[in-house]
Amino acid sequence: MSSGMSAIRVQDLEKVFPGDVRAVDSVTFDVREGEVFGFLGPNGAGKTTTISILNTLMLPTGGKAEVLGFDVVTQASKVRRGIGLVPQDLTSDEELTGRENIELQAKLYHIPSSEAGKRADELLSLVGLTDSQNRIVKTYSGGMKKRLEFATGLVHKPRILFLDEPTLGLDIQTRTSLWEHIRQLKSETNMTIFLTTHYLEEADNLCDRIAIIDHGKIIALDTSEGLKKAVGGDVIEVEVAECGQDVIEMIRAIPGVSLLDGKCTGNNARIKVPDSNVALPLILEGFWSKKISVLNVAVKKPSLDQAFLEYTGRELRDEGKGNGGKPAATAPKRSRQRRGR
Amino acid sequence: MRDLKRWYRTPGQILLVFTTPLMWLLLFGQAFNIGKLAQGAPGVDIRYVFGGTTDYFSFMAVGQTTFIILFGSLFSGVSLIWDRKTGFLAKLQVAPIPRASIPLSRMTSTVVKALLQAFVVLVLAALFAYVPGLSGLKFSHQFGVLEVLGVALFLLLLGLSLAALFVALGLIVKSEETLFGLINLLNFPLMFTSSALIPIALMPEWLKAVARYNPLTFVVDGMRQLIFHTSIGAQYSIGVDLLGIGIFAALMICIGAVLSRKALLRA
C-alpha cells in the first residue's frame, strides 16, 4: 500500500541530554507513506525520545527531521495538524466521560461541533466503547482507557499515527483487539503508522519494516523477514529412525543446504537452509527417494529474538528491563543498516 | 480562542467550592463582631475604622470575597502540575493550538470560577441579615449596577494578576510540594498584611506601611467604597485603587506571559 512518498524523513537526528547522555545518536531513516514502521528496542534505547522529537514535543540537539514534508523544528504547527499520538501513559481526563474526552480532542483539533458528534460515534463504536461512552473515565478498566486513548488519537483522521508502546501492560484481549484495529487502519486507510515497542511479537506481527534501536543508535533496519534472514536462515529438523552415513551423504548432495555441526544430533538431522519454503520439498524428496523413512519434520524459522540477539549482543526481555540483558556468548556485534525496497 | 471552553470541569467540584467560603463566613465573621466592642468610645465615628460600615462583619465580608479570589488564583497552577504528570499537558502541546491558549484557558477558567464564587458569597453575606441571630453584609442603598460592575472589575483584576503568575509557576515548577510551598509563602502574608480582615487604623506602624502597598488592600478598599457607598475611612480614592490594582495586574500578566512562554518552550 506504500505509495513511495516519504511520510517521515530523519537525518542524523541527535538528542543529547545534560551530562552528555546521547539519547538519540545520529539516527537516520525514512518512513514511507502508508507504511507501518516499528522502532524495536529495550527501555532506554531512545524510542520515546525519538517519537517525542517527531511529534514536536521535544527539540533535537542536532540533525534534521521532517514529518509530512514539514520540519519539526521550524514548522511544528503544520506538523501537529497532520499527526495523531497515542501516548504511553493514559492521558484522558478522568473526570469527564469517554465521549466528552473525544469531543474535547475534536475541539483541540478544530473540528466543528457538527462533525465532532458523528466522529465521536464512529470512533466509540470502532473501539467498542459505545455502551460506556457516558460514564466517567475514572470508572473504566485499564483496557477501556487504552481503547479510548486509541480512539482519541484518531479523532482528526491524522495522516500519521504515532503509537508509543501501544500494548504495554495490557491484557491479551485488549492487546489483540488493538492489533486488529491497527491492521484495519493499515488495510482500510493510507495512514502511516509509526510505533515503538519492546515486544518482539508486536513488531513482527504488525510492522512492514522494523528498526532495531539500542543506546540511541539504529542497529538494523529491514522487514521482519529480512532481519531474520540476516541471522542465517531457517533450520529444518528431520527425525529419522537411524541417522547413518547415508543420511549425511544424501544431505550433502542437496544444493545450498548444510548439516548443522556436520553430523546428526541423536536421531535428528538439523539442516541449515537459506529458505525453508524452497528447501523443504527438496529435502523430503531426497529422503524419500533414498527410501529413508522420515518420522518427523520441524521447520524452525529464526525468531526475531535471535535476530535481536544477533544484532545487539543481548536479549530483549519482554518485561522491558532493558539494560539488564545478558550479553550473547556467541553473537558478534554487527552494525548494519539495510533499507528494504 | 474557543479553545478556552476546554476547561469545563465536573459540576461536582463547583458545589464543593461554594461550601468552603460559606463556612468561613459563618465561623469567622460572626465571632469577630468587634464593632460591638468598639461602639462604646464616644466621639469616634466607627465608620472611619471600618472603611465606611459600622460592623465588623460587613467590613470583613468584603475582605472575605477577595480571599476567595486569592485562593482560587493561587491554586490555579496546581492542576497544571497534575496535567503534566498525567501526560495531558503533552496532549495539549501536540495539538495544533496556539501555545498561549494553554495558560490563557487555565487563567480564564480560574477567574470565572473565582468570580462566581465571590459573588455567591457576597449574596449570601447579604442574606445573612435575614437570618435571626446573624448580622449580615450591609450594602448601601445606593448599590446599583454600576457598583456591581465596579466590584466585578476589582475582583477580576485581582484574579487575573494572581492567576497569571501562578499559572506560569504551575508550568515551571514540576512538583506540587514546591508549588504549595510557594503558595503558602504568599498566602498568609498577603491576607494579613492587607486591610481585608483588620482595619488599617488598628495596625502597628510597620504593618501599616506594608498594607498600604498590598494589592489586596487596593481591591478591598475600592470594593468597600463601592459597596458602602462612602469614602469615609477609605485608604485611597477609588480611582487610585483601580489604578493600583490595574498596574499590578499588568505587571503580573507580563511576568506570567514571559514565564509561561519559557516553560512551554520545548525541551
Image (cartoon, coloured by chain):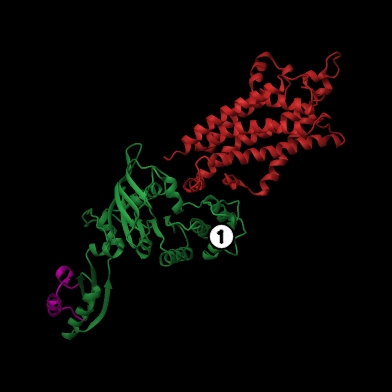
Q: Is residue A316 magenta?
A: no
Q: Nearer the viewer, residue B55 or A259?
A: B55
Subunit that carries the residue with mark 1: A
| Residue B11 in view in this figure | yes
What type is the residue that disc 1 sits on?
A: Ala
- Mark 1 lies on a secondary structure that is helix
Q: Give me the residue at 64% from left, 31% from top.
A: B157
The location of residue A53, given as percent across then percent down, is 39, 46
Judge whether B70 appears above or below A30 on screen. above
Range of magenta residues: A241-265
Residue on which disc 1 sits: A120
Judge whether B176 appears above or below A68 on screen. above
Q: Nearer the viewer, residue B195 or A228?
A: B195
Q: Is residue A260 magenta?
A: yes
In this structure image, what is the colour of chain B?
A: red
Chain letter, green in picture: A
